[in-house]
Image (cartoon, rainbow, N blue to C red):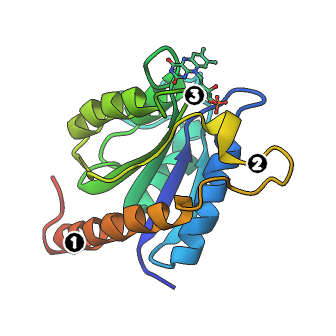
Amino acid sequence: MSNLRLAIIIGSTREQRFGDKITNWFADRAREHGGFEIDVIDLADVPLTAQGPARGPLPAEFADFAARIDAADAFVFSTPEYNHGYPASLKAALDILREQWWGKPCTFLGYGGISGGIRAVEQLRQVVGELHMADIREAFIVPFGPFRFFDKETGEVTDPDAAATVVTVLDRLQWWAQALADARKARPFA
Ligand SMILES: Cc1cc2nc3c(=O)[nH]c(=O)nc-3n(C[C@H](O)[C@H](O)[C@H](O)COP(=O)(O)O)c2cc1C
C-alpha cells in the first residue's frame, strides 16, 4: 500500500449525472494502479450551499471535507463541461479551502460532449494555480463520455486504450505527488 493519498473529486452534483459513473470507473483503475491510497470525494455530499470564509475559522460543516483534502497528496478533479465551463460546485469546493490545497499536484478527468470537457479543464488550470497547486500536463479527456464511454448493452468500456491512458496519467501524477510530498516534508509550504 502506497503512503501517497489521492483524492478523486466528483465535480458534478446533478441528479442522474454521468460523473459518478465515470469517476468511480477511474477510481477503480487508480486502485489497480497501486501508486496511491484512494479517497473518492463526492461533492454531492459536501454542503456547498454554505459559504466558507476566505480567512478565519472554517465552519464545522466543512470539517470532514477539509480533513480529507488536507490528508491528500494529490488530486484528480472530475469535471463535466457545462456551457464551455466547469460546474459551480467545483468552484465552491475550491474556494472554501485554502492551505489544504497548497503545494500539491493535480490532474483532471474531463468529459462532456464534443469537447471532452477540455474547455472546463483549461479553465480549472487557471484557478488551481492561484491555490498553489501544480497541475500536470497529462489529463484524462473523454469526448462524448455519457454517450460512448460505456457500451449501452454490455456496460463495457468502449475505448480499448482508456485504462492504459489512466495508467500514464497516474504515473506522472505519482512522480509529482512524491516529489512535492518530499518537498513539503523538507520545507513546509508557506
Ligand atoms: C447545462 C449543460 C450545458 C452543457 N454544455 C456543454 C458544453 O458546453 N460542451 C460540452 O461538450 N458538453 C456540454 N454539455 C454536456 C455535458 O457535458 C454532459 O451531458 C455531461 O455528461 C454532464 O455531466 P454530468 O452528467 O456528470 O453532470 C452540457 C450539459 C448540460 C446539462
Name the image quarter holding residue 125.
top left
- Which residue does the numbered mark 2 point to in the structure image? 151
Residue type of the residue flagged with mark 3: Leu
Relative to 40, is 128 on the left or the right? left
Labels 1 and 2 touching (C-beta < 8 A): no
Q: Position of residue 185 (x, y in %)?
A: 21, 73
Residue 101 disc label = none
Along the polypeptide, which appears first: circle 1 or circle 2?
2
Q: CA distance from mark 1 to mark 2?
A: 38 Å
- Which residue is at the far right? 153
Q: CA distance from mark 3 to mark 2?
A: 33 Å
Q: Quadrant of residue 49?
A: top right
The three-letter amino acid code for the residue at tag 1 is Ala
Residue at label 3? Answer: 48
Residue 190 locus on image (x, y percent): 15, 52
Marks 3, 2: nearer the viewer: 2
Where does label 1 land, which residue? 179
User: Label 2 crowding class (10 Å Cα cut-off): few <14, some 14-19, many 20+?
Assistant: few
